[in-house]
Amino acid sequence: MSGSYRFQDHYFHRAKKDHYLARAVYKLEEIQNRHRIMRPGDRVLDLGAAPGSWVQLASGVVGPRGRVVAVDVKPIEHSFEGNVTVQQGDVFDDAIVEQLLRDHAPFDAVLSDMAPTTSGIRSADSARSSLLFERALVVAERALRPGGHFLAKIFHGSEFHDLLVRVKRRFRRVKVVKPDASRKMSKEIYILGMEYKGDI
Ligand SMILES: C[S@@+](CC[C@H](N)C(=O)[O-])C[C@H]1O[C@@H](n2cnc3c(N)ncnc32)[C@H](O)[C@@H]1O
């Protein structure tokens, strides 16, 4: 068995055993343990949330006084705790975003694990991922309270540097994170913006 298969297997089985919907949860768990981007009572917006493992983790962290709003183009089938609101829709749909902001903003944290359907052509995939990242940032700029946090996935590519600069302009502390639970071979990486500066 190759190293990467063993790796895939390890997190897959661990997620099953822990009753998580996807192994992606261990990436958020690692970042949460290190940076405490969510706290009890927080309101969290999760973009690209299906099948819902990040929602499960976030729902547990924010607890009954908090709320997690989960959005995905795909249906999210799982029935979560009562502090979770699920909305099916495309983040590029302005009507969906306006509705979310009206009903639930301000948020303490905005998360995006959104990923494009990959074509295998690296430059095309990273360009699509950058568009998703940029959209998540635009939504976060409207949804976050000052002092709130932003975590979003991006496939490393030519747009990465400019987007990192944009995040640095809007957040007091910024980190680039490659969780251990993310495959070493994969181009995915997370940009974490902490302490949103608010309107400038
Ligand atoms: C890697 S999965 C997310 C896994 C999730 N964090 C979990 O733990 O279960 C990426 C998701 O992004 C969603 N996505 C991609 N483009 C989107 C868009 N334009 N609007 C909303 N969701 C999108 C996909 O449908 C997919 O479910």
Image: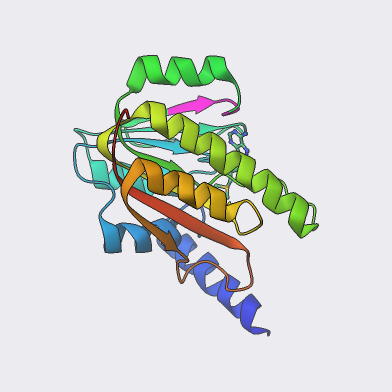
Q: Residue at x 75, y 55 (%)?
A: 123
Q: Residue at x 69, y 44 (%)?
A: 128
Quarter of the figure with the N terminus = bottom right
Q: Position of residue 94 (x, y in %)?
A: 56, 18
Q: Position of residue 51 (x, y in %)?
A: 54, 44
Going by the image, does 158 lie left or right of 9?
right
Tell me which colouring the rendered structure shows: rainbow
Does the rendering let one see residue 134? yes
Specify whether residue 190 is painted magenta.
Answer: no
Locate residue 2: give its quadrant.
bottom right
Quarter of the figure with the C terminus = top left
Q: Is residue 107 above or below residue 178?
A: above
Q: Is residue 129 above or below residue 144?
A: below
Q: Position of residue 125 (x, y in %)?
A: 72, 51
Q: Position of residue 184 (x, y in %)?
A: 58, 73
Q: Residue at x 79, y 58 (%)?
A: 120
Q: 179 or 76: nearer the eye?
A: 179
Q: 165 or 10: nearer the eye?
A: 165
**Residue extent of the magenta highlight:** 86-91
Q: Is residue 73 above or below residue 14?
A: above
